[in-house]
Image (cartoon, helix red, strand yellow):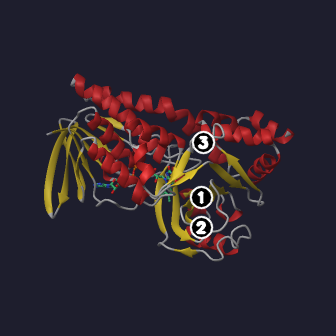
Amino acid sequence: MYDVIVVGAGPGGSSTAGFLAKKGFKVLLLDRAKFPRDKTCGDGISGRSVQVLSELGALEHFKDVEHQDMYGVTFSSPEGVVVPISATKSKNSPPPGFVCRRFVFDNVLFEHAKRLGAEAIEEFLVTDLIMENGYVVGVKGRHEGKEKEFRAKVVVGADGAGGITARKLGAYNDDESHQAAAVRAYYEGVEGMEDKIELHFVKESLPGYFWIFPLPNKRANVGIGMLVSEMKKKKINLVKTMEKIIQENPMFKERFKNAKRISPVKSWILPLGSKRVKNYGNGYVLVGDASSLIDPFSGEGIGNALTSGKIASEVIAKALEEGDVSEARLAEYHKRLFDLIGDELNTNYNMQRLGRFEFLLNLVIRKAQRSREIQEEISRALLNPQEHKKFVKLDFYLKVLLA
Ligand SMILES: Cc1cc2nc3c(=O)[nH]c(=O)nc-3n(C[C@H](O)[C@H](O)[C@H](O)COP(=O)(O)OP(=O)(O)OC[C@H]3O[C@@H](n4cnc5c(N)ncnc54)[C@H](O)[C@@H]3O)c2cc1C
């Protein structure tokens, strides 16, 4: 009997398990994979992630592994204007984010959760939830060819997009207008990369973007993402579109001239936070992608997975101490999480919708290239998600027009 079973050891699961184990609870962390394992991702670790990693005591462990510090974002518009924006508080401040292959990143976090006291079983495939008297009381699964069951006072679903826990609990986001699809591959020998992640709103990638996230030794995580509903409506093949951009777009064909793809192209789904699912109930909560928390504009999900893990651990800890793991008690998790990120998700959903207008992207990026004031506005917003609100207000576009 455990206090908490966490299904899935990605950022959402390892952070929940780590925070709870740190508080002294008996935690079992299960994952179907053997670590280290890959996860299809852009590998961009934002300021929000850095904050939670630091609170968990995990940040220092990234100093010793392969990663690339990042100091801002380079944007480009459909008409080909490029503008690099710094996102540092001052000249000597630490990097606000970094790029780290998930093969490496998730393993560091998984090892950290174990060091904090979580018991872990790899290659354990959870196949079902155990329900009693309307409560989730454990999980069933397969490990080393045998059927096994474990019981706990609370089960945390952290099994990512397409996972079993959200499906079993009726919380799965299968709405194609609130899901993105993305493909990514690793390249070697990409020219012209600097200390910034690159988001390119090239014509071929709209409504979505093409990214280049720099890694050490001229390697890069390269990909493209788009809303599933739009992709299907326009019959877009993401792999072919990415190849076309790399081979034909004048902004990239020179940069990729000597580059070599060093991995297969992989695709995966992104459940977006523009759709809110019920992520708590009697004896359970859902975190990260299982709770559909990905930023609808940027596609960033690691920060919200870590944040949801942190808040879930705090609410679960209190619920366990009070001996009440009912839906009513665990509802505090949903409330606290959306009090913190709800507004931002709504705003960024509106930004995603505005981003479909090519002329707006052209206008903002063209003006940003010329105006220090607009650059500073964007830079502040990169550092502080609360400031995203201005991008969906008329005032901002008037300021842009006058800049
Ligand atoms: C192409 C692409 C690019 C992206 N780029 C970025 C980016 O640059 N930055 C960013 O912040 N976000 C990005 N995201 C989003 C990010 O990858 C996710 O939001 C993040 O991984 C969510 O973490 P998680 O812990 O909720 O789930 P996951 O990382 O998916 O982890 C889920 C874990 O559960 C395990 N699991 C699944 N089913 C079971 C089962 N039945 N039994 C046991 N274990 C199970 C899996 O093995 C896995 O380890 C991207 C996503 C995609 C698809």
Precedes in sequence: disc 2 or disc 1: 1
Q: Say which residue label 1 marks.
A: 230
Q: Residue at x 79, y 41 (%)?
A: 372
Give amino acid for label 1. Glu
Give amino acid for label 2. Ile
Q: Residue furthest right?
A: 402
Residue 284 seen: yes
Give amino acid for label 3. Asn
**What SS does tag 3 mark?**
helix
Q: Distance between the residues labelled 3 and 1?
A: 17 Å
Q: Residue at x 64, y 61 (%)?
A: 193
Q: Residue 101 carries which label?
A: none
Up the image or down, 87 lies above or below 76; here it is above
Up the image or down, 262 lies above or below 147; here it is below
Q: Are marks 2 and 1 in contact (CB under 8 Å)?
A: yes
In the image: residue 236, left or right of residue 137: right
Q: Say which residue label 3 marks.
A: 348
Res 350 quadrant in image: top right
x and y percentages locating residue 265 in the rendered image: 49, 70
Q: How far apart are marks 3 and 2 (CA)?
A: 23 Å
Q: Say which residue label 2 marks.
A: 236
Quadrant where the C terminus lies?
A: top right
x and y percentages locating residue 377 in the rendered image: 72, 38
x and y percentages locating residue 159 in the rendered image: 34, 51
